[in-house]
């Protein structure tokens, strides 16, 4: 009799856990681009700098910040920061300029990194891998079976990343452009710039791409 009660208890607990998991997986609003200038960058209407705290720590999601530790572009000229002076806790850093060539930046900021990239756009507007490992790296950093939350400084790099992923077969309904860290005022900020005015980059969960170890496509 006791054994039967124990088994029933396990079944009830299991059902409750499954119910909670399903609720967690299904309670995301579908990506919806906001209006105005922010919409031109592809920033989401519902999940953005103001609301992202409610969606952190999900087991069905990954969080990626697309900035460089130090960007050659002068983002200070448009009210931003060329340095990664902070980030939202839970986000991992994957520099977009290492994935693709960045174009269309505001004239005032100048140019960003223009070195080697995992992908390049061909004459037909399609991204082609430059290394045999390019797609494997992308799939590892941006799992197709997860929701993907993207952030950067102002929203532009995040929007470009979503465009890259969707063009290569990712489901656009699982990818959110959360916007820019420069406008984040939540409680999960990790400060990288210290009181001395230097940067504690050792705090940053950073994905470096060492092109020297990769095999070029011939």
Image (cartoon, rainbow, N blue to C red):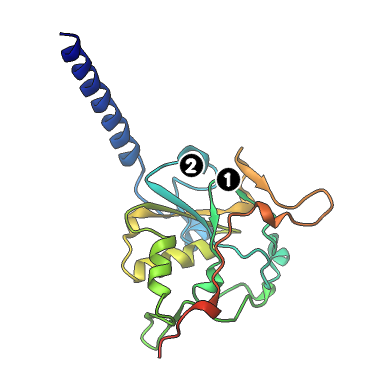
- For this orientation, the residue located farthest to the bottom is 218
Residue 103 visible at all: no
Residue 89 — which label? 1
Q: What element carries label 2?
A: loop
Q: Position of residue 128 (x, y in %)?
A: 39, 81
Q: Which of 23 and 12 is in front in this view?
A: 12
- 3D distance between C-alphas at marks 2 and 1: 8 Å
Residue displayed at 66% across by 51% down: 203
**Residue denoted by label 2:** 56
Image quadrant of residue 201? Answer: bottom right
Q: Is residue 30 left or right of residue 104?
A: left
Task: Give the crowd class for mark 2: few <14, some 14-19, many >=20 residues within 10 Å.
Answer: some
Number of callouts in the render?
2
Residue displayed at 31% across by 60% down: 171
Q: Which of 98 and 29 is in front in this view?
A: 98
Instruction: Give the mark, 2 or 1, whose residue is nearer the N terminus.
Output: 2
Q: Where is residue 92 in the image (x, y as percent from the top left)?
A: 54, 54
Residue 88 visible at all: yes
């Amino acid at each position: 009799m006791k054994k039967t009660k124990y088994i029933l208890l396990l079944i009830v607990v299991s059902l409750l856990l499954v119910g909670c998991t399903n609720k967690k997986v299904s309670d995301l609003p579908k990506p919806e681009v906001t209006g105005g200038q922010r919409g031109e960058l592809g920033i989401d209407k519902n999940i953005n700098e103001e609301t992202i705290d409610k969606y952190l720590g999900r087991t069905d999601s990954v969080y990626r910040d697309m900035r460089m530790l130090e960007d050659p572009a002068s983002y200070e000229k448009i009210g931003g920061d060329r340095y990664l002076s902070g980030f939202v806790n839970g986000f991992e850093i994957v520099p977009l300029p290492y994935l693709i060539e960045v174009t269309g930046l505001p004239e005032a900021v100048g140019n960003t990194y223009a070195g080697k990239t995992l992908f390049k756009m061909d004459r037909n507007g399609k991204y082609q891998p430059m290394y045999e490992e390019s797609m494997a790296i992308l799939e590892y950093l941006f799992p197709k079976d997860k929701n993907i939350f993207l952030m950067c400084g102002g929203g532009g790099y995040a929007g470009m990343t979503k465009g890259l992923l969707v063009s290569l077969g990712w489901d656009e309904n699982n990818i959110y452009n959360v916007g820019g860290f420069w406008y984040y005022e939540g409680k999960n900020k990790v400060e990288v710039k210290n009181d001395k005015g230097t940067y504690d980059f050792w705090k940053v969960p950073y994905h470096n791409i060492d092109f020297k170890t990769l095999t070029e496509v011939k």
